Image: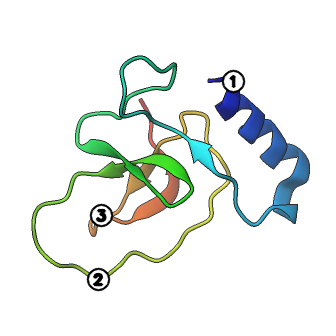
Amino acid sequence: MKTLLICLLLSAILGSALSAICVEMCSLHDDLDIPKCPDGFVCRSNGCGHTCQPELGVGKREPCPLVRCIPCSSGIYEYDENGCQTCQCLQA
């Protein structure tokens, strides 16, 4: 949780000076103080940390465009009908 707060604080202070921040928004392990993903989402690596991503059925689809969002309070974003992340914060 401390890592998340530090990352959010850095992004607020540095704003657009950072092109990306590695964050651990979810955990695959029960022993860490990082929240689990809500139903319908799974914790996966995004190449630079872990984020909640929608569970997708088997099949091919077009890759999602890269989105850069301002961090939201829950750290979990909504996904569109194609399973791609939006910048809308998921309301708990």
Q: How many marks?
A: 3
The structure residue drawn at horizontal position 69% and vertical position 24%, both measured from the top left corner, is 2
- Relative placement, left or right, of 22 versus 9 is left
- In the picture of the structure, the residue carrying the numbered disc 3 is 83
Location of residue 92 by image quarter: top left
**Amino acid type, residue under disc 1 in the picture:** Lys
- Alpha-carbon neighbours of circle 1 within 10 Å: few (<14), some, or many (≥20)? few
Quadrant of the drawing holding the N terminus: top right
User: In the rendering, at what x and y percent does residue 35 appear?
Assistant: 45, 26
Query: From the viewer's perspective, is residue 68 above or below residue 33?
Result: below
- In the picture of the structure, the residue carrying the numbered disc 1 is 2
User: In the rendering, at what x and y percent does residue 16 appear?
Assistant: 83, 63
**Amino acid type, residue under disc 2 in the picture:** Glu
- In the picture of the structure, the residue carrying the numbered disc 2 is 62
Mark 1 or 2, closer to the camera = 1
- Alpha-carbon neighbours of circle 2 within 10 Å: few (<14), some, or many (≥20)? few
Query: From the viewer's perspective, is residue 76 above or below residue 47?
Result: above
SS type, badge 3: loop
The structure residue drawn at horizontal position 47% and vertical position 42%, both measured from the top left corner, is 76
SS type, badge 2: loop
User: Distance from label 1 to label 3 (Cα)?
Assistant: 29 Å
The structure residue drawn at horizontal position 22% and vertical position 52%, both measured from the top left corner, is 55
Disc on res. 32 = none
User: Distance from label 2 to label 3 (Cα)?
Assistant: 10 Å
Location of residue 8 by image quarter: top right
Between residue 48 and residue 10, name the one nearer to us.
Answer: 48
- Asked if labels 2 and 1 touch by Cβ distance under 8 angstroms, the answer is no
For this orientation, the residue located farthest to the left is 58
